[in-house]
Amino acid sequence: MMQRRAFLTLAAGAAAGAVLPFSARASGPAPSLPALDVHPGRIIRTVAGLRPFRAEGYVVRAERFSRRQTLVHHYGHGGAGVTMSWGTAAETVRVLESATSERSCAVIGSGVIGLTTALMLLRRGHQVTLYADALPPHTTSNIAGAYWGIASLYRRDAASPDFMARMRAAARYAHRAFQHLAGDPRYGVYWVRAFDLYDRLPANPASRPDMPELFPGFSRALGPDAYWGHSAVDSFHQLMIDPDIYLRALMADVENAGGRFAAARFEDARDVSRLRERVIVNCTGMGARALFGDEQLEPNRGQLTLLLPQPEIDYAYTTRFEGASLYMFPRRGALVLGGSHGRGDWSLEIDPAEQDRVLRGHGEMARAIAAG
């Protein structure tokens, strides 16, 4: 992993805002791809989780917590926790080491943000204990889509220019970190072909060419019917992360680096202040609202339906159906169908109507892909 100087170099590059060319072409023959089998009998399970969303973007900052303790916040990644984890963990380590010289750290929260932050601190020579009341596979991170993409991370009209510069630097850092893990079967990180499909190209599509190095092989097809019934199709290659494999590997890396895991449940900030460590790193995601009073943090509910795997499916796509988003991501152990975004919805109950919408939408996509 890059150290502090490399992170600052990346940040400077992000501020410069360099833009590389990308290719755009008229529509041609659609790629020949194997179609999904979305028969309801292939459903493995349907799960729901709460993305920790902040309109202004994620929080990384340090503050005095008690007479003897420094508190460093690292939370609020919306639907991009896995995506941004290495980049914002690097930012957190930089902020922590600027705020205090203490080396004894407690990381609270055992999702991808907590595990990645703990590992980076250990590699910097800190002593780390990770406290949580649940460990993988029983975390919100385990039910993330975990396709590398900056989704539901911030609201464009609320994020500051400073945040956008930091976010871009962190995204570049994170993408490079995952590239180093791709292909190693221990981590479950691999490249897939990806397609963003639009009926009308938005002003700021998800596959923005303003950071072209994050979308290798990017091209854009435009036309009345570019293909698969859409008038604009962005294609590129992107990283896919299998959370069940990846989080187990991160836990092993933390333990091998000397980190400790401890069971703990925190009801309020006073419980946190009783920890013996001099530095507390808050990686609790949605828990930061109750523990530390962040009223800007709100849930963005997501629901995923997992199907039996199809080994021949080596591509991912995002589109819209019935006015809402729709996506398919392939994993070794399942096909992930999703697209739910329930801002302000705290429910973890399965919504049958949303599951039906997702299955019908992917069924239409399967028929369009089969037709070519």
Image: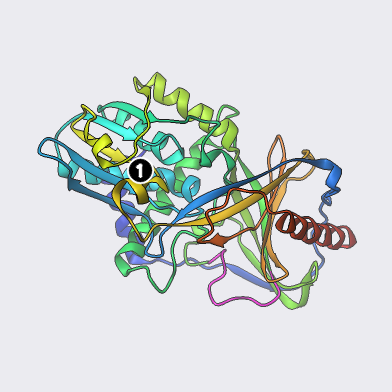
Can you identify the residue that label 1 sits on? Answer: 89
- Residue farthest along the right direction in this orientation: 371
Report the side of 126 relative to 230 (left or right): left
Left or right position of 364 against 104 = right
**Figure check: 330 above or below 320:** above
Q: Position of residue 369 (x, y in %)?
A: 83, 59
Q: Secondary structure at mark 1?
A: helix
- Which range of residues does the magenta coloring cover? 198-208
Of 303 and 321, the residue lying toward us: 303
Q: Is residue 175 visible?
A: no
Q: Nearer the viewer, residue 184 or 202?
A: 202
User: Tag 1: residue type?
Assistant: Ala
Quadrant of res 59: bottom left
Q: Position of residue 315 (x, y in %)?
A: 71, 50
Q: Are there few (<14), some (14-19), or many (20+) residues within 10 Å of tag 1?
A: many
Provide residue 351's location: percent of width, then percent of height: 68, 54
Residue situated furthest bottom in the rendering: 224
Q: Position of residue 57 (x, y in %)?
A: 38, 60
- Residue 352 located left or right of residue 86: right
Q: Nearer the viewer, residue 190 or 353?
A: 353
Q: Is residue 211 visible?
A: yes
What residue do we see at 57% from left, 45% from top? 144
**Can you say which quadrant of the picture contains the C terminus?**
bottom right
Q: Main structural element of the magenta stretch: helix, strand or loop?
A: loop
The residue sitting at 40% across, 60% down in the picture is 54
Per the image, is 367 magenta? no
Q: Quadrant of the N terminus?
A: top left
